[in-house]
Amino acid sequence: MSNDAYREEPGRDLSTWTLDKLQMFIHDARGQQLETARVAAQGQAYNSSHSQEARRQWAKLSLVANRRILENAGGRSARDVQQDFMLRMWVIDRLGPDDTDPDWSPEALASDTLGALTFTSTQAAGLAEGWRDLPIEQIRELRWHKNLTAHLECLVGHLAPGPVRERLVAWTATRPLLP
């Protein structure tokens, strides 16, 4: 189906679309259209008048749009990866975890978070001590880590004791030190 069939008209509100219609739109959308669809789907996920299952479906659709944005960008975007993590955390926390779906599994989110980090919490804490003297690229990377760990205080409460949980607890102590 062509994007022309969904070309936004002035005043068109994607938040009024059905799940199926928005899903078809996301399949063909690019650029800002994907971001608009991601936000619309996320808004529906937050809508407490929907059933929990419907809210999960809307959240899943928002993740699909967000991941298409990442694919089209050709790599990792700090903002888009953080949005993925934050929405997943919101669903886990508000609608409950579901270990049959990796998007709603606390353990999978923990693993994905650790996989996205390029520093250990100890390395990040060491760099944070003198962050003002670092090259801008390293400051950006520390900021990236701060953004990617924003959900951890909530996440650790959903994890069983063990090495992964301990690594994330260490990040919760490091995060406030980061620029």
Image (cartoon, rainbow, N blue to C red):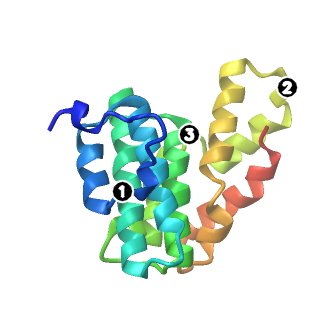
- Residue 151 on image: x %, y %: 62, 60
**Percent coordinates x, y for residue 121 in the rendering:** 67, 49
Q: Residue at x 63, y 38 (%)?
A: 144
Category of crowding for the residue at label 3, using alpha-carbon neighbours closer than 10 angstroms: few (below 14), some (14–19), many (at least 20)? few
**Which three-letter amino acid code belongs to the residue tagged 1?**
Trp
**Label at residue 79:** 3
Considering only vertical position in the picture, is 67 above or below 87?
A: above
Residue in front for this viewpoint, 62 or 125: 62
Query: Residue at position x 50%, y 73% from top?
Result: 92
Residue 98 vs residue 37, the one in the foreground: 37
Question: Which comes before the other along the chain, label 3 or label 2?
Answer: 3
Sequence-first disc among 1 and 2:
1
Q: Are marks 3 and 1 in contact (CB under 8 Å)?
A: no
Q: Say which label, 3 or 1, has the lower sequence index.
A: 1
Measure the C-alpha gap from mark 3 to mark 2. Answer: 23 Å
Q: CA distance from mark 3 to mark 1?
A: 25 Å
* Residue type for callout 3: Arg
Residue under the point 32% across and 33% down: 7
Q: Position of residue 95 (x, y in %)?
A: 49, 79
Residue that badge 1 annotates: 17
The location of residue 1, given as percent across then percent down, is 14, 38
User: Seen in the image, is 30 located left or right of residue 166?
Assistant: left
Q: Which residue is mark 2?
A: 132
| Residue at the front extreme of this rendering | 10
The label nearer to you, 3 versus 1, is 1
Query: What kind of element bears circle 3?
Result: helix
Give the farthest residue toward the top: 135
Secondary structure of the residue carrying tag 2 is helix
* Res 14 seen here: yes
State the residue in front, 75 or 57.
Answer: 57
